[in-house]
Every structure is written in C-alpha cells, then in structure tokens.
Image: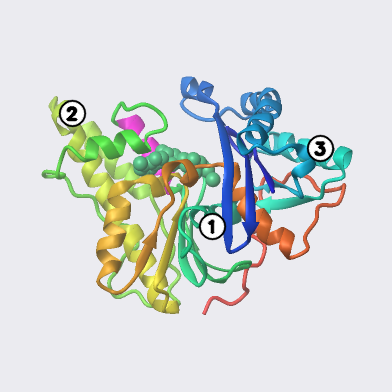
Amino acid sequence: MLGIETSCDETSAAVVRGTPDSPVMESLVILSQDVHRLFGGVVPEIASRQHLTGIVPTVTAALGDAGVELADIDAIAVTHAPGLVGALLVGTSYAKALGFARGIPVVPVHHLEGHLFATLLEERDAVPPFTALLVSGGHTLLLDVPAWGEYRLLGGTRDDAAGEAFDKTGKLLGLPYPGGRPVEELARTSDGGAFRFSRPMVRSNAQPGDDDYYDLSFSGLKTAVLTAVRECERAGTLDAARAAIANAFQGAVIDTLVEKVDRARRAFDRSRIVLGGGVACNRALQEAMRRRFATRGGAVFAPSPRLATDNAAMIAAAGLFRFAAGERADPTMTAHASLPLPGILSHVS
Ligand code: KG4
Ligand code: ZN
C-alpha cells in the first residue's frame, strides 16, 4: 500500500504492507513545510504550492526507501478529508492520476481514522477495543472504538483544539511556533510555583449523559494564561515566571485530558488507551496517563513523534483496512475540508 498525506503542512508518502491488524512500515518520508514558521501558522495557499512541488520527489523517495517500484504497489491510500481543501486536492488529484495511469486502485482515507491506526505500526496490541484520544493542532476528540471502522464519538472540544492551546500559550510566553514542544520543555524546568489554573469541565459530580461529561474546552484556560502573563508583565516578573506559567498551563490540560479519558474508559470498560495527534508526543501527558491507568490494569499506547504527527504511514495502515473492506475510490473522489469520520455509531452508550 502506497500512502499519501497532504492535508495540512506535511507532504508525506509511505509504503506499508501486511494485514489490517498487523501492518508493517517499509518506508516513511515526511517533508515538513518549515516556511509557515515565518507566519506563526499555516498559510493555506503556500501549503498547496509546496505540496505541488514536493509530492513527486516524496513519493519517489518513499518507493526507493522501501526498495519497490510502482509495479509492486497493489493500492494507493490517500487522505481525502478533513483538512485544507487546496492541500488535500494535491494528494487526491495525484493519487487518482497515478492510479488511473498505472491501473492501481485508490482508497480514500479519513485523516482521523489514520491517526487511530498510527500506533499499530509500532505496537501490535494497539487494536480495538480501546478508548482513543486524538489531540493535535486541528482536532481534539474522545472516542470509543469497539472495532476498526466502528467509532463512538464521545466528546470533543467546544472551542480551541488542545494543540492550539499549546501554540497560543507558547506565543504568549514568547516561544517559537508551533508551541507544543517548547512549552513542554519549559514546563519541565518548573513545578508551577504559585500558579494554578482551573481545570475546565471536570466537575466531580458530573454524570454520564451530562453534556459536559466528555466535552473539552480550552479557551478559558487560554484567557487565564493571558491574564497571568499580563499581570507578570505589569509587575516586571514575567521572565522569572514563564516556566511556572508553562508548567501550570500544561498541568491543567493534562489533568483534564486524563480525567476525560478515564470517564470514557470506565463507561465502556476498556483496558487499552490509544493516543494520537501531535499533542500525544507530550511526555508529561503520556506519563500522567500511564500513572492513572497502570494501577487499573490499563495499557496506554502512544506513537513515537514521527507517527503521532501527520504522516502517510498511518494513512496507508488505515488504507489496508479500508482496502480489505472492499472500498475503492471512483473517478469523482475529491477533497473535503470537513467530513464526518466513517463508521460513527449513532448511539453513544
Ligand atoms: O498532529 P499534528 O502534527 O498536526 C495537526 O494535525 O494539527 O499536531 C501539531 C500540534 C501542534 O499544535 C503542536 O504544538 C502540538 O501538536 N505538539 C505538542 C507537542 N508536540 C507537538 N503539544 C504538546 N506537547 C508536545 N510535545
Ligand atoms: Zn492530524
């Protein structure tokens, strides 16, 4: 399976073989578009143009690294949604043209389903049933996954994505974009000191069925960080307080995410937790999840940074599953900026 991912600011291609339950990664090439750092965020038009120039060399390198040729490829899996539509179109158009010219079937893959398969490339036990938390710059989703292709959407963010909260906090603290890793590194040098931000939507008397039971919200936390930064600026103490603010912010995000995952895990009696998305790289988050669930016989799976962030190997792995299920793109297949995850189960409990 040749995987192609161009939904945001990574041009990526990979070759994966095997079965849906045990995919083997033969190669993975990720061309990160560093140009967006200059703008402090992804510029869609620039992203599309960079995908256009990057796609052919990226696919060529992925085939070369895997030691295969196009003639050896059985199918092409491509991200068709969700994401920046111009960026996605480069991948879908390229995959369709390649498939048509070479007689290779094309399988459309939902980007978030890709994130659910990422961990499986490294951990054979990261298979359903499990509780999944997808946390990246663009999405924050809590899911129950009884089987591949069956997804219970439990909750999501009502405002900012978890990664966005890290990026905005990083910006307020004068750190480079994207802020996730710099905030984590700075947070490690402090214990939070006098700072403590309230944990959003974690009332201890919340019950399943309450509308905030699984949902998340980070905009209030962002405002709390902003207020703390302003106060320190006025008092001339910001330099000394930056690490403590980073630590207190990260602690509030982690406590909230761990609590929500615990609620989902208990509701469906799951022993496996699968994390995905860029924020899943956060070591403090992984450790907090393991601390909470290890004593309860739970196993926490988090992909390595290369597979946690956007990449084509996870798209190829999800593609193996969709291909085995008989799914094929027809010539009208196109890119969608937003599209629900396929296989959403209608009732939550
Ligand atoms: O999955 P990803 O590469 O792209 C999206 O689909 O958004 O995630 C990028 C996000 C950024 O917001 C970045 O700040 C965050 O993941 N991130 C982290 C860490 N590494 C990346 N957040 C917290 N801690 C990290 N170590
Ligand atoms: Zn993503």
Q: Earlier in the sequence, mark 3 or mark 1?
A: 3
**Looking at numbered disc 3 in the image, what kind of residue is underneath it?**
Leu
Q: Which residue is mark 1?
A: 116
> Secondary structure under badge 2?
helix
Q: Are marks 3 and 2 in contact (CB under 8 Å)?
A: no
Is residue 86 toward the left or the right of residue 131 in the image?
right
Q: Is mark 2 in CB contact (under 8 Å) with mark 1?
A: no
Position of 255 relative to 167 (above/below) = below
Q: Which residue is mark 3?
A: 98
Residue 125 seen by the camera: yes
Instruction: Tell me the residue that label 2 is attached to.
Output: 238
Q: Residue at x 66, y 61 (%)?
A: 321
Distance (Cα) linking label 3 and label 2: 54 Å
Task: Tell me the SS state at disc 3.
Answer: helix
- For the magenta stretch, what is the residue range? 162-172
Which residue appears at 37% of the width and 71% of the height?
A: 263
